[in-house]
Image (tube, rainbow, N blue to C red):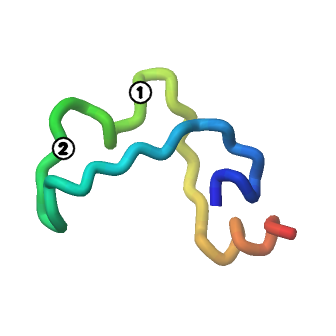
Amino acid sequence: MPAAVQDRRAVVTDPQPGMFAAVAGDVLIAGDDARLAPTRYWDWLATRP
């Protein structure tokens, strides 16, 4: 998916932790400068080509 929308961020995988592993640090939390807005899946999908 990232390549389809020209997103150049790297996707990092780890085969070791398993399905219910914990992630160290705040990698799944938005930063202090994040813009948060309500987004409904169907609204987002309607904007996709």
The residue furthest front is 15
Q: Is residue 8 above or below residue 18?
A: above
Amino acid of disc 1: Gly
The residue furthest right is 49
Q: Which residue is mark 2?
A: 23
Residue plotted at (57% across, 48% down): 37
Which badge, 1 or 2, is on the more N-terminal residue? 2
Q: Is residue 7 above or below residue 42?
A: above
Amino acid of disc 2: Val
**Nearer the observer, disc 1 or disc 2?**
2
Q: Which residue is mark 1?
A: 31
The residue furthest top is 33
Residue plotted at (60% across, 72% down): 41
Q: Quadrant of residue 49?
A: bottom right
Where is residue 19 shown, x and y percent of the image?
18, 67
Residue plotted at (56% across, 34% down): 35
Where is residue 31 shown, x and y percent of the image?
41, 27
- Per the image, label 1 sits on a secondary structure element best described as loop
